[in-house]
Amino acid sequence: MKKSDHYKTIAKPAPETLFKDKGSKFYGYAFKVTTEDEVKDKLEELWQNHNKASHICYAWQLGKRYEHYRANDDGEPSNSAGMPIYGQLQSFDVTQVLVAVVRYYGGTNLGVGGLINAYRTSAQMTLEGAQIVNRTIKTELELKFGYDLMNNVMRVIKEKNLVIKDQDMHLDCKIILAIRETDLNQIKERFDAIFGVKTKVLKD
């Protein structure tokens, strides 16, 4: 689990890649995912599109702090497919990503070494073709205050160039800000210093 306040992911699904070895074909895919349910949906889609495939092996990494991962060999020899794919997720330092490799058996056994090379190469080609982007981890800060404090609050928002994610302006006002994690405490203190403003940190 990383302590950094930013992470790398892919902007959109990567173009399909194809790696061949001794008649076997390995089609590589990378998808942006945020939950295990999304992973499941993408894998079901792949099986529908490749219902004659021998194996669909995969690895995923989830969480903005790289908290969760899984690798699956789908019947290939242990650690010959899923872990080499996961190794490429680590090499490219990406999260919120599923990489799946669809294999069509070509009639010749590749051996464990050959399989490791094929799945690793396929995953590498796929991530090389993906658009990798940097994202900042932001935490939401809720502000509640009377309308008479609007100018004071907006002055800080403008001065610190803060992003307003949501707002509800009536007699009692509520603003939700998206704030870079490393700046959170300093920004919160600024608003806490305005008498009458209530602050609350929301979970990201």
Image: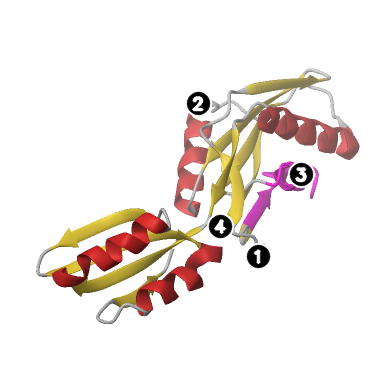
**Residue named by callout 1:** 3
Q: Magenta includes 92?
A: yes
- Where in the figure is residue 200, as x and y percent of width and height? 35, 75
Above or below residue 68? Residue 112 is: above
Front-most of residues 168 and 40? 168
What residue would you read off at disc 3?
91
Question: Can the viewer see residue 61 in this picture?
Answer: no
Q: Is residue 136 above or below residue 126?
A: below
Return the disc, 4 or 3, that comes first in the chain's sequence. Answer: 4
Q: Residues within 10 Å of mark 1 (few under 14, many from 20)?
A: few
Marker disc for residue 108: none
The residue shown at (46%, 46%) is: 38
Instruction: State the separation of the CA atoms marked 4 and 3.
Output: 17 Å
Name the front one of labels 1 and 2. Answer: 1
Q: Which residue is mark 4?
A: 63
Q: Amino acid at mark 3?
A: Ser
Q: Amino acid at mark 4?
A: Gly
**Dot in front, 2 or 3:** 3
Horizontal relation, residue 169 to residue 5: left or right: left
Q: Quadrant of residue 194?
A: bottom left
SS class, disc 2 = helix
Q: Quadrant of the N terminus?
A: bottom right
SS of the residue under disc 1: loop
Write the residue at 42% across / 68% down. 203
Per the image, the residue denoted by label 2 is: 49
- The part of the chain drawn in magenta is 69-93
Mark 1: amino acid? Lys
Pointer 4: residues within 10 angstroms few (<14), some, or many (20+)?
A: some
Say whether marks 1 and 3 touch (CB < 8 Å). Answer: no
Residue 131 at x, y = what percent?
A: 59, 31
User: SS of the residue at dot 4?
Assistant: loop
